[in-house]
Image: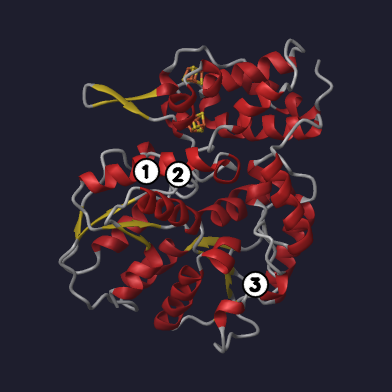
Amino acid sequence: MSSNSKLEEIRKWIYDCVKCSNCKWLDEAGGHARSCPAGLKFRFESYYSSGKVWIARALLENKLEFSDSVIQKIYACPTCGNCQELCGMHVAEHLVEIFETLRAAAVEAGKGPLPSHKAFKESVDANRNPYGEPHESRLKWIGDLKIKEKAEIVYFVGCTAAYRRQEIASATLKLFNRMGVEFALTPDEWCCGSPLIRTGQIAGMKEIIEHNMKAMQDLGAKRIITACAGCYKTLSKDYPKILGRDLGVEIVHITDFILETVKDGTLKFEKESNETVTYHDPCHLGRHSKIYDSPRELIESVPGVKFIEMERNRERAWCCGAGGGVKSAFKEWSVEIAMERIEEAEKTGASKLITSCPFCKTNLLDAATAKNSTLKIYDITEYLLEKL
Ligand code: SF4
Ligand code: SF4
């Protein structure tokens, strides 16, 4: 029996891995396509999902300690979930949960997380965002625009859109206005906590959740809309799990929300498009939340658009490389992963690569710049706004 309570939580799953290695490759087109960014980069079994599951077993059985080498391996993973789609054992649906719990166990043991993760936790504690920006300037991007004080629809902006990708927050707001949606948002929104959960820094999460939910329910929220894949997964999946109860409000990703208004005829894309575009599934929206169709239906509802899939798409999409704390702790590798996605997008002949997550957009932009790519990177909100 391990003295680490977090390791005990995953005991029920980790003896199910049979080391078959199905999680390592996509068996497609008569060959083995690349699927696990971590294993493919670092080339040792311990970086693949099976390796991390067996690390968990050895830690639980006190045959291994959280050495620097073990810490490196458990944090060198963007938690993309590709392995979950490929594994055929019962452990499959728990793999990412196992990796995140391993990280929480490392934090509990006083050995994790990595220094850059500690820095963003300190910033979330002090500023309510991981970017070191003042909390008071969270809604600076709104300018003079008047927002309703109360509404049943509340827009949860998220830190990346509020501080780093304000064009996405603005596009979302403009789309709400064009849809005639009455909505509210709160200047006292806190970081949703995704960066903390992904890196095992879960102490204090209940306070964050209770604060955010109260702030939005005080506005009258019945439906909470977010245009961030990370916030969406955190609010819809992690919040109820951590609280152990239903939130009592509906959490909706912007793509599902806009699609409703396109289907009922409220929103129409008037501008003819004669361009070829492709779409990158954010891991948190696709594999983790199973939202694959709404973004595609929206893109294909633009008149004249030619939509081409990348070779690895939907459940098998190659990760952008930014998630799971990888963007902050392994900067170069993170962009390297995204460069592979840019190359794949370029092969479709598309002039625009559309995604539906501010964090994916940031990393794809960094990779496109590093590669001198002519591909234009769009968030779906910006793309759709352009077509009204
Ligand atoms: S994680 Fe699943 S697919 Fe991978 S080795 Fe273990 S059982 Fe096989
Ligand atoms: S989550 Fe992604 S990077 Fe991590 S082990 Fe699974 S496939 Fe590899």
Q: Is residue 47 above or below residue 139?
A: above
Three-letter code for the amino acid on which mark 3 is drawn: Arg
Foreground: disc 1 or disc 3? 1
Q: Exactly how many numbered labels are in the figure? A: 3
Residue 147 is drawn in which quadrant? bottom right
Three-letter code for the amino acid on which mark 2 is drawn: Val
Residue 385, visible in the rendered structure: yes
Q: Determine crowd level at label 2: few under 14, some 14-19, many 20+ residues with C-alpha closer than 10 A.
A: many
Question: Disc 1 marks which residue?
Answer: 339
Q: Is residue 276 left or right of residue 242?
A: left
Seen from the viewer's position, the closer of residues 32 and 222 is 32
Rendered residue at 59%/22% (across/down):
52
Question: Disc 2 marks which residue?
Answer: 335
> How has the structure been colored for display?
secondary structure
- What secondary structure is found at the residue carrying circle 2? helix
**Relative image position of residue 208 (x, y in whole percent):** 75, 57
- What secondary structure is found at the residue carrying circle 1? helix
Three-letter code for the amino acid on which mark 1 is drawn: Met
Q: Which mark is residue 138?
A: 3
Seen from the viewer's position, the closer of residues 387 and 46 is 46
Q: Determine crowd level at label 1: few under 14, some 14-19, many 20+ residues with C-alpha closer than 10 A.
A: many
* Labels 2 and 1 touching (C-beta < 8 A): yes
Rendered residue at 48%/80% (across/down):
181
What is the spatial separation of the Cα atoms under label 3 and label 2, in whole angstroms?
27 Å
Q: Is residue 174 left or right of residue 385?
A: right
